[in-house]
Amino acid sequence: MEKPRVRIYTDYKSPYAFVANKRLFELEETCGVELEWLPYTLRIPEFMGTVEERTPHFWRKVRYAYMDARRYANAQGLTMKGPRRIYDAFYASAGMLFAQRHGLFRPYHDTVFRRFWSHDLEIDELSAISGVIASIGGSSDQFEAYVHGPARAEHDRIIDEAEALGVFGVPTMVFNGELFWGGDRIDMLIERIQNPESIVTALGSRYRT
């Protein structure tokens, strides 16, 4: 029998995506689902504005968000250092897609998250991501050919499809067409996997498949 599938949109520069990984991977064992991981590369200026436009109120929220995410990280024994600048994670997202095709997804995924949040990896440098691919047994030459070839079109198509579903942030999980945003919605996702007909009445039939 085919396993139920949960699609997960993630971004390596999101602290909340990082700390949600452990529980999300556990779904494979605890709920018997198949996980489909896809990149949703956040375009920070679109929803946070430029640095010059940000108010003191905004920075208080940012400081709290990183403190909050760090509490989750500490509970898992993870290192989380605040990002040093604004990153474009396209190369890291392309690396995810490349690694999946070559059977290297989990080591790639874990390595990129761990090293980025330890300040040991610049995810917007092609040579750095190529180095990760090579370190886990992949071909850096093939990866760079992919980046200079079809990667951008594939990446943008995935983003467009995600936004058509209603995705706006990460981690976002999609199950039977219903969206769950944030690691604090994993319990609700589990309940829905175990009882797929228990969609709350307020949602109506919008998310049914």
Image (spheres, rainbow, N blue to C red):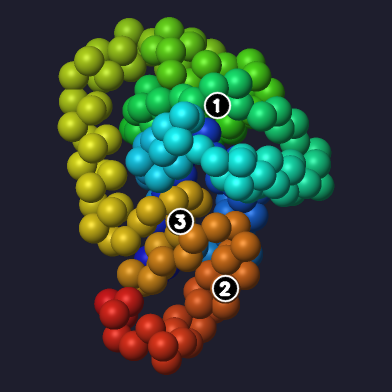
Q: Which residue is mark 1?
A: 112
Name the spot of residue 25 as percent of width and height, x first. Answer: 58, 51
Q: Which residue is mark 2?
A: 188
Question: Residue at 41% across / 88% down in the picture?
Answer: 202
Q: Separation of disc 2 and disc 3 at Cα? A: 13 Å
Residue 190 marker: none
Task: Inspect the image, locate mark 2, and give the three-letter code of the amino acid beneath it.
Answer: Met
Disc 1 on helix, strand or loop? helix
Q: What separation in Å lies between label 1 and label 3 (alpha carbons)?
A: 19 Å
**99 w.r.t. 194: above or below:** above
Q: Earlier in the sequence, mark 2 or mark 1?
A: 1
Residue neighbourhood size for the residue with mark 1, other residues' Cα within 10 Å, grouped as few (<14), some (14–19), many (≥20): many
Mark 1 vs mark 3, foreground winner is 3
The x, y position of residue 71, in whole percent, is: 78, 46
Q: Earlier in the sequence, mark 1 or mark 3?
A: 1
Mark 2 Cα shell of 10 Å, populated few (<14), some (14-19), many (≥20) = few
Q: Secondary structure at mark 3?
A: strand
The reply to whether residue 103 is in sight is no
Quadrant of the drawing holding the C terminus: bottom left
Kind of residue indicated by mark 3? Thr
Q: Residue at x 55, y 58 (%)?
A: 182
93 vs 197: above or below: above
Q: Is residue 30 left or right of residue 208?
A: right
Q: Which residue is mark 3?
A: 172
| Residue 125 visible in the displayed image | yes
